[in-house]
Structure formats: structure tokens, C-alpha cells
Image: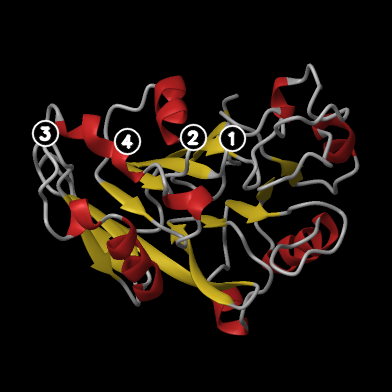
Amino acid sequence: MATDEALKVTLLGTGTSTGVPVIGCRCRVCTSADPRDERTRCAAYVQADGLGLVIDTGPDFRRQALREQLGRIDAVLFTHHHFDHVVGLDDLRPFFFGNRATLPCYARANTAQVLDNMFPYIFRDGTYPGVPDLALRRIEGPFDVSSRYDDLGPVRVEPIDVFHGALPMYGYRIGRFAYLTDTSALPDHSFDKLHDLDVLVLDALRHEHHPTHFTIEEAVETARRIGARQTYFIHMTHSILHEETDAGLPDGINLGYDGLTFEIPRSTSQAPKGIR
């Protein structure tokens, strides 16, 4: 895929592993009337010149797919194998009702191994009736995603090495868009792959230190180093009140929220266009 392809991105979920509101909590965020403070588990949907790419399938994936009326998926890109990013995998079954073509699931080798162990009825024996025809694709470098409908050209995806504490995992770059969730550090060579972005989506858990996630302040520092024209933070906890925190961020950096959709135009002379 050339770097000038048009993209449309929807943030399906922007919350940490518990989701927000947190069960049993009555804090000001969990009881907020602002819909931007309701955060399902992190995932994204990318439309790249017509192809549909899902990034992660967490426990809220069914709800997210219904809310956004997802109609086409050509591939799933997994960032890593933690529960809140993979456990909704079986909810991909309805996407086979009108198209029986195999759906590739791209992942780093460590994540692919865990998925194979978690879902043996999908990836090994195939004995469950109606099992989705998913195929694990272990990746180490850039790869092309093809259409499951044989109607569009391939899309180039570049995995980006990041660390989630001690766990090596992937973010993804597609054209001038990059998605880095669950991140606490980037090696220098990953920064080299993130030049000239229109939009960066980046992990920013909370203000207080955490061993496996960027804080808001660390995410701001990282976003400034990368220098995307627009950055959106995701994976926030219930300590982050959207309106208050967003107002204190630098220009060009904002909190993401569930359902946020933006377009990345073909020309770098045009600014990324937020839709909602």
C-alpha cells in the first residue's frame, strides 16, 4: 500500500482492562454523564481504501461491532495476547455468514502461540459446529492484507516493536496512521518507523506511574518525539475525566473516546478530518 492511500479509522474502545465505568465504583468518572467517560476495552477499525481491518478483539467486540455497524472485515491485527485484547475472537463468526473465505489473524509469534492454546477449537481441531475459519499468520515484518472479497487491491501494514512492561508486542502502522496500545517503552528503531504520521493513537493509562503503561505525561513526551500532526490517547482508567484532562493537553494531542472516527486524506497538505 502506498503511503498516500485514504484511511478512515474508528476507535471501537479506549478503556483499560476493567472498562469504564468500573464494576461497583461510584467515583466521578464512573458516574459521569459525559458519554466520552464510558470506555469499552481497546480496539480499532481501519478502513483502508475499502478493506476492513480490525485491531484486537476484546471482550466488548460484539457490542462495539453492533454499535458501529461493522459490515466487512478482511483481517484482524493482534497487538498482544492479554485477555482484554483477544477474548472476543469467537464473535467474528457472523462475518462468515455472507462470506466463507478464510479470515487471516496477524500476530507476533508469542501472541500467535497463546491464541493457538486459548482457542484450539478454532485453530487446531475445528470440531465446534460453525467454527469461524480463522488462520493465524505469524509476522516479523511488513506484510500485505488482501481482500476476502476479491474486489480490492492489497493494503500494506507495518508492525512496530513496542514493550508492554517486559512483554514484546506490536503496534501497527498503516499509511500515515499508527496505533500503539499497551505501551511503556519504544526501542529507537521503532521511532525511526514513525516519521511523517498524520494521526498517532497512543497508550496513556493515567497520571500515576504504572510499570507496563505510559502515564499521561510520558505519553505526551513520546507523542512530541514522534511528532504526528494529531495524537489521540487511549487505554485510560477511571481516574481520567475526559473533559478535564483533555483541556490540559498540548495542542495536537487529545484524549480519544469510544466511537471517535477520523479520516486521513491522501494529501499531506490536508489536515486529518475528525468526523465525530
Neighbor class of circle 2 (other Cα within 10 Å; few <14, some 14-19, many 20+) is many
Neighbor class of circle 3 (other Cα within 10 Å; few <14, some 14-19, many 20+) is few
Reading the image, the residue beneath label 4 is: 91
The label nearer to you, 2 versus 3, is 2
Place of residue 182 in the rendered image (x, y in percent of width and height, measured from the top left): 61, 60
- Return the disc, 4 or 3, that comes first in the chain's sequence: 4
x 42%, y 47%: residue: 87
- Return the disc, 2 or 4, that comes first in the chain's sequence: 2
x 65%, y 57%: residue: 228
Regarding mark 1 in the picture, which secondary structure is present there?
A: loop
Neighbor class of circle 4 (other Cα within 10 Å; few <14, some 14-19, many 20+) is some
- Return the disc, 1 or 3, that comes first in the chain's sequence: 1
Where is 143 relative to 203, above or below? below
Regarding mark 2 in the picture, which secondary structure is present there?
A: loop
The label nearer to you, 4 versus 3, is 4
* Residue located farthest toward the top when viewing the structure as drawn: 33
Discs 2, 3 touching: Cβ within 8 Å: no
Mark carried by residue 99: 3
Where is 95 relative to 212, above or below? above
User: Left of 193 or right of it: where is 104?
Assistant: left
Reading the image, the residue beneath label 1 is: 40
- Return the disc, 1 or 2, that comes first in the chain's sequence: 1
Discs 2, 4 touching: Cβ within 8 Å: no
Mark carried by residue 60: 2
x 81%, y 22%: residue: 31
Q: Where does the C terminus fall, quadrant-wise?
A: top right
Label 2 to label 4: alpha-carbon separation: 10 Å
- Return the disc, 2 or 3, that comes first in the chain's sequence: 2
